[in-house]
Image (cartoon, helix red, strand yellow):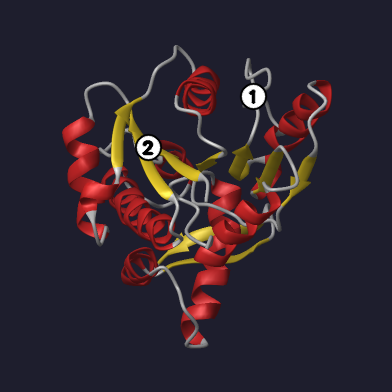
Amino acid sequence: MATVALRTQRPVEGNALAELAAGTPLTDTEAATLYRHACKDVAEIAESSGASLLVTYPEGSEAQVIEMVEPALDDPSEARFEPQVGSTPAARMGNTVTHLLEKEAESSVAVLDPTAVLATRSTIDQAAMKLRSSAVVVGPAAAGGIYYAGFTDTLDFEDIDRQPMVETLVDRAAEAGLSTDVLAPSPTLSTVPDLQSTLPILRGRRQAGLPVPERTSQYLADLDLHVTESAENGVEIEKS
């Protein structure tokens, strides 16, 4: 199984999911609370897959991130918590992947968005299987973003987060002569378009009695956050 790395933000008001607080009815406090619930759900999913879990955190937020994630884990002692290294998000991602593959001789490394609450154990298992035959595996999110990126080899990570990131990753893999596979799309909670896609899926699954990420789904239900038609923008997010 791949090592799965969750690259967390500082889980505090005004920082976590700041884009949602600016572009939806969510307040800074609600966005940060939503982020913390999502991180717990996704960490729990990653741990249940049997993968080795690595949680990386911004400088100065170690205690906050550990306090957020550990209660969701069956065996917190099995998870690793390490600081992010690099001057940009792309550099931090590249440093994590390169260090694990080259310095720690991991066979494969996956970077999973900590708000990819629709990812399941089977999603991670399927991606790990694909990494046996492809050097790079990408999971597209909404609007060209990604929720998953798996690697068995390194590539040029400079500006790897240039949008649409899914195309950037595939192009870089091709430039490096690496084979690539693509997972089924799955939105996250990271951006407004992602949340617009995720909300109806979560509400539909919850109403149908299907499995959902419990913490995230319950919090969104408590907020009564939902997507409605908008004559101006097609759809918009409202809170009752």
Task: Left or right? Give the position of 90 relative to 64.
Answer: right
What quarter of the picture does the C terminus occupy? bottom left
Identify which amino acid the numbered label 1 is placed on: Thr
Identify which amino acid the numbered label 2 is placed on: Thr
Which residue carries the number 2 mark?
8
In terms of image quadrants, where is residue 239?
bottom left
Q: CA distance from mark 2 to mark 1?
A: 22 Å
Residue at 32% across, 66% down: 215
**Secondary structure beneath label 2:** loop
Residue at 35% across, 59% down: 44
Which residue carries the number 1 mark?
154
Q: Is residue 172 visible?
A: yes
Task: Left or right? Give the position of 145 relative to 92.
Answer: right
In terms of image quadrants, where is residue 228?
bottom right
Task: Left or right? Give the position of 227 relative to 38.
Answer: right
Taking depth in this image into account, of 38 and 230 the one nearest to the observer is 38
Dot 1, crowdedness within 10 Å: few (<14), some or many (≥20)? Answer: some
Task: Left or right? Give the position of 82 relative to 203.
Answer: left
Taking depth in this image into account, of 21 and 7 the one nearest to the observer is 7
Does residue 204 sit above or below 213 in this rendering? below
Residue at 36% across, 51% down: 39
Residue 98: percent from left, percent from top = 54, 22
Taking depth in this image into account, of 74 and 212 the one nearest to the observer is 74
Does residue 82 sit above or below 134 in this rendering? above
Residue 5: percent from left, percent from top = 44, 40
Residue 96: percent from left, percent from top = 47, 26
**Secondary structure beneath label 1:** loop
